[in-house]
């Protein structure tokens, strides 16, 4: 019941704003601040003598106990208040009119109902003060009990239209809410030596992710998890050490499994790079260098330190590790916007936000929790048979000369791949001049230094040379208006791109395009010319194809970007001719048949009138069409019924 009341207190109290520090009274006026780090000076920790403790534990009502403790605290701390200069806190003197304080008639104060209500509010305020005392002593449960008592009092208060009482009631409700948040946040702050601060939640969302990672032997996600788990041994020891040094949960060391699969060169669609998937701006914010020679997002050790600093900052904002993970994935600003938009108040609980977050982020936290469940019970999920890699051993040498990794590897008798793995942050396999700490295998550093003069100087990287690779992979977007007969595959062939790229650029669902709609076609290179309009000099010549098991005229035509009619005509095949395994077919070049006309949009189809007894399977087989294609071109499904006289399209 008490926890229920606490929840109600938060539910009703966030009208005024979000969490703020309690020790500074003026902070309550800043309602735009979401959350600030709560710090309590050890000098404010109140000491109690044996008499006070005995008195607080004696007989009497709960309120009398807490009132006695509070009075002793006030006696001991009253003298301290005068020691603090107002100027130290930069507090301005505000005009009373700024707060629009109403003047009340004396008769209103003398009203017995008003006095009773005021007495209840005063009593609730004392419970709030007692709660603060308990919280400073580290007794969180007693602090929550006091807030529970305070809230139960103000719930029964009826301000009866009195704006002054209403203001007091709302301020108390606001104070209670903030202190509840403060106490819960303090529970989540990880102190050194306490590393198991991430709750092992199990619900239907987490179980679904566990199933995706562990069920079915041919499951891609299961294979991904096994490979990532094997690679984890190479990096986790260092990550765990850094987390423990920062006083953070060691379980966070499994985060790269979800982010990158423990792959150093992992690159996302959002251009997030490396083990910890930093975008460039966030990496720079946390000290990761990026220039023509080096990208420290690719350095596992430096990226780990940056990730620890980033997560620590996020935890200071949200106070809950699950929400920290969500913010790490989609950005703290996105999560803050979701929190502000909530109708239900946020109480350091990621699952309050789950349905309001982007789908990828919403699944990110359950994926991480599923990972914790799996790795904590490797025998149950079949991981005990997987041996993990060991961390790479190395030593560092300071290199002041600009050299190529290939030359350095040759000098010390190791492969270029070995040096590249140790120095993954080098973007072009060139050690920059001016002093660089190069990692080399153990006992090879002295040899490299002694032979440094024998190595040639690597050429300087200019802006022009680094842009050459970019131009090869650049794309130009063309616009195409979809016409009848167009398909994603024919458009991809015509513009020399892939179906996947067209789908991604246009966010197409279920690979369907609509006639009349204009779509974007990503075309490689700067010219952007499609195959349909390419120069006649570059037309392909006729080629040959040897018929293999499972081949049909339709899939051969599709493979070579032509039609069944053209292949049949080019090879003198009769209608409905059967192919033989080993038969050699000539495939016509596009130029031969397209000298005076444009490439046709789609395959040659003819009309077939359904007869009695026909079913889709027999019709497709009769015309050497795959059943899936037959159903697709006729907009049918496996359960569709066809009728005599109905017109269908066939090859």
Image: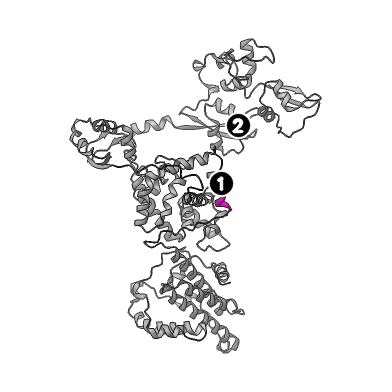
User: For residue 446, which quarter of the picture?
Assistant: top left
- Tag shown at residue 622: none
Q: Which residue is mark 2?
A: 481
In space, the residues marked 1 and 2 are separated at their CA atoms by 43 Å
Q: Is residue 540 visible?
A: yes
Specify the color scheme.
one colour
Instruction: Point out the stretch of residues depicted in magenta.
Output: 198-210
Q: Which mark's residue is nearer the viewer, 1 or 2? A: 1
How far from the left and from the top, in percent, is residue 142? 48, 75
Instruction: Name above or below for residue 631 compared with residue 209.
Output: above
- Tag shown at residue 211: 1
Q: Residue at x 48, y 72 (%)?
A: 141
- Circle 2 packing at 10 Å, graded few (<14), some (14-19), many (20+), is few
Q: Quadrant of the C terminus?
A: top right
Name the foreground residue: 151 vs 119. 151
How far from the left and from the top, in percent, is residue 501? 53, 34
How far from the left and from the top, in percent, is residue 467? 37, 33
Q: Quadrant of the N terminus?
A: bottom right
Instruction: Name above or below for residue 110 compared with residue 551.
Output: below
How far from the left and from the top, in percent, is residue 389? 38, 42
């Amino acid at each position: 019941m008490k926890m229920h009341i606490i929840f109600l207190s938060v539910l009703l109290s966030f009208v005024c704003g979000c969490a703020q520090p309690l020790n500074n009274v003026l902070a309550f006026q800043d309602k735009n601040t979401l959350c600030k780090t709560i710090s309590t000076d050890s000098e404010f920790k109140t000491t109690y003598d044996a008499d006070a403790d005995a008195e607080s534990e004696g007989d009497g009502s709960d309120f009398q106990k807490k009132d006695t403790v509070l009075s002793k605290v006030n006696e001991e701390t009253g003298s301290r208040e005068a020691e603090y200069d107002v100027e130290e806190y930069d507090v301005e003197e505000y005009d009373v009119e700024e707060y629009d304080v109403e003047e009340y008639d004396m008769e209103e104060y003398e009203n017995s109902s008003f006095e009773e209500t005021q007495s209840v509010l005063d009593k609730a305020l004392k419970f709030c003060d007692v709660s603060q005392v308990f919280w400073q002593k580290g007794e969180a449960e007693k602090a929550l009990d006091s807030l529970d008592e305070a809230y139960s009092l103000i719930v029964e208060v009826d301000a009866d239209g009195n704006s002054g009482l209403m203001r007091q009631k709302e301020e108390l409700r606001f104070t209670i809410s903030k202190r509840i948040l403060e106490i819960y946040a303090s529970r989540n702050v990880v102190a050194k030596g306490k590393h198991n601060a991430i709750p092992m939640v199990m619900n239907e969302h987490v179980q679904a992710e566990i199933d995706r990672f562990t069920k079915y032997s041919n499951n891609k996600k299961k294979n991904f998890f096994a490979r990532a788990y094997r690679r984890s041994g190479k990096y986790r020891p260092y990550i765990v050490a850094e987390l423990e040094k920062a006083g953070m949960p060691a379980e966070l060391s499994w985060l790269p499994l979800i982010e990158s699969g423990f792959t150093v060169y992992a690159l996302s669609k959002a251009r997030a790079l490396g083990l910890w998937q930093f975008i460039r701006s966030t990496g720079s914010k946390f000290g990761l260098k990026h220039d023509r020679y080096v990208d420290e997002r690719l350095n596992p050790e430096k990226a780990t330190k940056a990730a620890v600093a980033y997560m620590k900052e996020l935890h200071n904002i949200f106070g809950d590790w699950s929400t920290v993970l969500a913010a790490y994935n989609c950005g703290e600003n996105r999560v803050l916007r979701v929190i502000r938009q909530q109708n239900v108040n946020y109480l350091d609980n990621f699952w309050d936000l789950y349905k309001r977050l982007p789908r990828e982020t919403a699944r990110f936290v359950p994926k991480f929790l599923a990972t914790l469940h799996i790795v904590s019970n490797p025998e149950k999920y079949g991981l005990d048979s997987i041996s993990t890699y060991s961390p790479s051993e190395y030593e560092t040498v300071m290199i002041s000369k600009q050299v190529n990794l290939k030359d350095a590897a040759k000098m010390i008798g190791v492969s270029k791949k070995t040096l590249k793995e140790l120095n993954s942050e080098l973007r072009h396999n060139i050690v920059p001049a001016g002093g660089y700490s190069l990692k080399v295998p153990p006992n090879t550093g002295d040899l490299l230094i002694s032979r440094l003069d024998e190595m040639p100087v690597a050429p300087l990287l200019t802006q022009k040379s680094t842009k050459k690779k970019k131009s090869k992979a650049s794309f130009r977007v063309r616009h195409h208006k979809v016409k009848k007969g167009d398909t994603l595959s024919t458009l991809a062939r015509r513009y020399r791109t892939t179906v996947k790229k067209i789908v991604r650029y246009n966010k197409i669902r279920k690979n369907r395009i609509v006639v009349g709609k204009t779509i974007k076609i990503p075309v490689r290179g700067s010219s952007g010319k499609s195959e349909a309009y390419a120069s006649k000099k570059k037309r392909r010549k006729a080629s040959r194809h040897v018929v293999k098991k499972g081949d049909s005229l339709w899939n051969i035509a599709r493979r070579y970007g032509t039609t069944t009619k053209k292949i049949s005509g080019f090879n003198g095949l009769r209608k409905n001719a059967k192919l033989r395994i080993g038969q050699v077919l000539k495939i016509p070049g596009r130029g031969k048949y397209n000298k005076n006309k444009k490439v046709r949009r789609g395959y040659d189809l003819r009309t077939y009138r359904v007869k009695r007894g026909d079913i889709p399977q027999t019709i497709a087989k009769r015309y050497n069409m795959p059943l899936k294609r037959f159903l697709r071109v006729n907009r049918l499904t496996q359960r569709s019924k066809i009728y005599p006289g109905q017109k269908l399209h066939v090859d």
